[in-house]
Image (tube, rainbow, N blue to C red):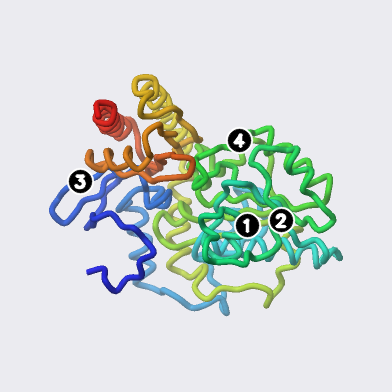
């Protein structure tokens, strides 16, 4: 029964009972190849034994104490993230949009603490997506998500993605930071040019701005590196992380340098549930797997194999798909037919995908897939494309 649920989702009439690896199963035993991953969330697939064991063991000991007390597993996870990234400070929360909100507050507090309270505006990119709160939809600036929620929260200036001329021209005395997704997800799986990311870093240094990366979707190994910005060789001052960091357990984080985080002192920000013992146990377990020797290299190899096979699919079905986009295992099929038609055809083949802007179907498989799952996916894609091509 769904009658009591708010009608905020147009749900497909499929319900899953269990999952294993890259596959989901209904109560009647039908299996689906999961190339949606809960919208890039179940990074290690379904029922990963290390994650299940970590959650069960922690659940038997302690669930929640609040941030009024030390949480040693949270201290450990923060230290591990700091060791492997640019960051020196970590704030744990429950979701990506909470990480974005924490980052926006951090940006404003940093400039206030350093004697520049007039700097409060953030430059963001067109076709971006940073979440569903009032502040996040204002940051994204997408009219589709703003409809019915006016007036927009002030403080954001929107420029074209991958366009340095527009970005430079948007900087004023009130500009505090630049917020960029290294790979746009909801906006159509569009990677930032690596030179663009390097130029944005230079501009931030030139004008004394904070560089704020949103790696909620493209981070935690999905690009073949721990974080997508690593391909460019530059680092941000602030970064929002979520989705894959908990592999299905609600977990987000705002990472920052010591300098950028200096304004967030006791009482300036908080969370009731964020960073509780359950979340921290899972987060550490996810990091155990992703940081294993060879894991990210295997993600990169699998992604390159899938990319080449998808390119061949485009060549053979140009009346269905016109382009492959993305990075690592965050890929988009720019469709000629409506993307909903391709996604529906794939559901008939028991393969799950996710829609995106610009008529794109997203492929977001678990990072644990290898050649067998890639071959299975390509067979299903082949049948779906053939059915659409033949009308």
In this rendering, position of residue 293 left or right of residue 169: left
Residue at numbered disc 1: 139
Earlier along the polypeptide chain: callout 4 or callout 2? 2
Q: Residue at x 75, y 38 (%)?
A: 165
Question: Which of these two is toward me, 6 or 260?
Answer: 6
Earlier along the polypeptide chain: callout 1 or callout 2? 2
Q: CA distance from mark 4 to mark 1?
A: 25 Å
Q: Are marks 2 and 3 in contact (CB under 8 Å)?
A: no
Q: CA distance from mark 4 to mark 2?
A: 24 Å
Earlier along the polypeptide chain: callout 4 or callout 3? 3
Label placed on residue 31: 3
Q: Position of residue 100 (x, y in %)?
A: 59, 60
Q: Residue at x 52, y 58 (%)?
A: 145
* For residue 25, above or below residue 165: below
Disc 2 packing (10 Å; few <14; some 14–19; many ≥20)? many
Earlier along the polypeptide chain: callout 2 or callout 3? 3
Q: Quadrant of the N terminus?
A: bottom left
Q: Quadrant of the C terminus?
A: top left
| Figure disc tally | 4
Residue at numbered disc 2: 122
Q: Secondary structure at mark 4?
A: helix
Q: Is residue 372 visible in the rendered structure shown here?
A: no
Q: Position of residue 180 (x, y in %)?
A: 64, 47
Q: Are marks 4 and 2 in contact (CB under 8 Å)?
A: no
């Amino acid at each position: 029964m769904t009658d009591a649920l708010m009608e905020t989702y147009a749900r497909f009439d499929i319900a899953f009972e269990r999952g294993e690896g890259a596959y989901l199963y209904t109560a009647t035993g039908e299996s689906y190849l999961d190339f949606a991953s809960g919208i890039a969330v179940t990074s290690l697939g379904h029922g990963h034994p290390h994650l299940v064991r970590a959650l069960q063991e922690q659940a038997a000991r302690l669930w929640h104490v609040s941030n009024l007390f030390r949480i040693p597993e949270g201290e450990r996870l923060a230290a591990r993230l700091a060791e492997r990234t640019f960051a020196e400070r970590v704030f744990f929360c429950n979701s990506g949009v909470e990480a974005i909100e924490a980052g926006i507050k951090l940006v404003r507090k940093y400039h206030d603490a350093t004697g520049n309270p007039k700097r409060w505006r953030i430059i963001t990119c067109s076709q971006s997506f940073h979440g569903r709160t009032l502040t996040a939809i204002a940051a994204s600036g997408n009219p589709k998500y703003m409809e019915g929620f006016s007036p927009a929260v002030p403080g954001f200036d929107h420029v074209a993605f991958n366009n340095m001329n527009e970005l430079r021209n948007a900087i004023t005395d009130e500009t505090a930071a630049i917020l960029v997704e290294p790979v746009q997800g909801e906006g159509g799986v569009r990677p930032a040019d690596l030179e663009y990311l390097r130029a944005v870093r230079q501009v931030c240094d030139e004008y004394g701005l904070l560089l704020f990366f949103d790696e909620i979707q493209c981070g935690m190994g999905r690009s073949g590196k721990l974080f997508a910005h690593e391909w460019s060789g530059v680092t941000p001052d602030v970064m929002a992380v979520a989705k894959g960091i908990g592999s299905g357990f609600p977990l987000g984080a705002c990472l920052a340098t010591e300098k950028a985080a200096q304004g967030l002192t006791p009482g300036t920000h908080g969370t009731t549930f964020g960073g509780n013992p359950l979340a921290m146990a899972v987060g550490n377990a996810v990091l155990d797997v992703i940081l294993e020797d060879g894991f990210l290299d295997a993600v990169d190899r699998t992604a390159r194999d899938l990319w080449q096979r998808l390119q061949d699919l485009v060549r053979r079905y140009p009346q269905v798909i016109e382009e492959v986009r993305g990075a690592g295992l965050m890929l988009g099929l720019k469709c000629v037919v409506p993307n909903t038609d391709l996604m529906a055809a794939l559901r008939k083949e028991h393969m799950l995908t996710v829609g995106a802007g610009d008529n794109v179907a997203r492929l977001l498989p678990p990072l644990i897939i290898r050649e067998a799952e890639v071959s299975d996916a390509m067979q299903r894609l082949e049948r779906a494309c053939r059915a659409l091509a033949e009308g």
